Image (spheres, rainbow, N blue to C red):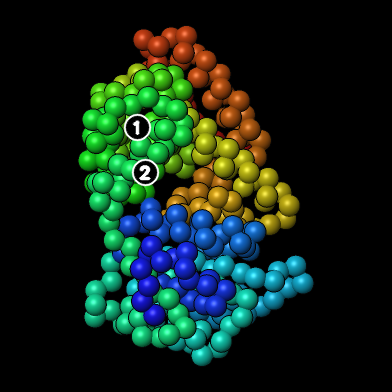
Amino acid sequence: MIKKAFEINKINLNAHNLFLFYGENEGYKNEIIKGKFEKLYQGQIYRYDEKEVLEKKSEFFNGILSKSFFENKKLIIISRATDKIKEVIEEIILTKIEDVKIILSANILEKKSKLRNLFEKEKDIICIAFYADTNQILSGFAIKFFRDKKIPISQETINLLVERCKGNRENLNNELEKIENFSKYDKKINSEDIIKLTNLAENYSASELIDSCLSKNIKKTSNILNENNYSDEDCILILRTLLIKAKRILKLQEEVKKNKTIDQVISTFKPPIFWKDKETVKQQMLCWSLEKIKNMIINISEVELTIKKNSSNSLNILSDFIINQAIKTNN
């Protein structure tokens, strides 16, 4: 059954168990999944990549059919869905599963797509296309964000920000988070700030630098630091990104201490870990013990204070710290 994205509030979600969300607007998809589905499932959320489902089909079916005393409902999100998963979905339709809601997230699916045609023709399953946002829509989101956060910014600067996000709501959300962190140190945001902050995404992002560091990929970490023209103003942003990701590893390791496997804690973590980041996060958990990550979080606060006291040398201080973390052994 075909539905429009703006009709989601009119759909009786309890009456349908299978949903296909396709299209290039990942940010809009994630908003709907988080706002309309995840809050109803209180920890009973399981994330898969299509490849995982196809390679471990029996395990997947056992998982969605099994019930426990403590688990009444499940939300299953399958990322990177393509026509390859059509037969699995047909089996699920025939099985008539209950108390399990499944969302397939796919990129652009052409009209000839077998998976798309299946969802469009079946009356009990929902098919929604998520097309790219217009600059006008993204501008509206940005204006509301800055108003709610009480961050002063001109419409001209907002227009520049929106243009650099290239119609991608997820890009905009990421950039707004950066700007919010930056605004704590320099309340007024101008066009030069936007260019500096969003410039990180044009080569390697701050997130990619930190992921390389936490994965102890010293070669890539060094390359990113050498290849990017980071400014002194970028240092706090990069350090805050490191702090956020370090705290996530800390929470994950604390869950592992409760006799859970790494895969279990990654799959059920809140907020959910994006499918393409799962392997990276797993590698980081193998690199950082609970004690080591606690020490790093303490050190991050100390380095931030040092940077603020030595702003003219902040880039060297940050680079040395990042490199040292990438080469530290976990023992």
For image coordinates 52% across by 45% down, the residue present is 284
Residue 226 in view of the camera = no
Circle 2 sits in a helix, a strand or a loop, which is it?
helix
Circle 1 sits in a helix, a strand or a loop, which is it?
helix
Residue 196 position within the rendered picture, expressed as x and y whole percent measured from the top left: 28, 27
Q: Is residue 248 left or right of residue 184?
A: right
Direction right: furthest residue: 69
Dividing the image into 4 quarters, which one contains the N terminus?
bottom left
Q: CA distance from mark 1 to mark 2?
A: 36 Å
Disc 1 designates what residue? 222
**Circle 1 Cα neighbour tier, 10 Å, few/some/many (<14 / 14–19 / ≥20):** some
Residue 90 in view of the camera = yes
Q: Give whichever of discs 1 and 2 has the lower sequence position.
A: 2
**Circle 2 Cα neighbour tier, 10 Å, few/some/many (<14 / 14–19 / ≥20):** some
Disc 2 designates what residue? 141
**Residue nearer the viewer, 32 or 48:** 32
**Residue nearer the viewer, 219 or 248:** 248
As drawn, 105 above or below 305: below
**Residue nearer the viewer, 150 or 207:** 150
As drawn, 135 above or below 92: above
Residue 322 position within the rendered picture, expressed as x and y whole percent measured from the top left: 44, 28
Question: What is the total number of numbered labels drawn onto the structure image?
Answer: 2
Q: In front of the other: label 1 or label 2?
A: 2
As drawn, 99 above or below 326: below
For image coordinates 57% across by 67% down, the residue present is 75
Amino acid type at circle 1 is Ser
Q: Is residue 116 left or right of residue 66?
A: left
Amino acid type at circle 2 is Phe
For image coordinates 35% across by 81% down, the residue present is 120
For image coordinates 68% across by 45% down, the residue present is 254
Residue 218 position within the rendered picture, expressed as x and y whole percent measured from the top left: 40, 36
Residue 70 position within the rendered picture, expressed as x and y whole percent measured from the top left: 75, 67
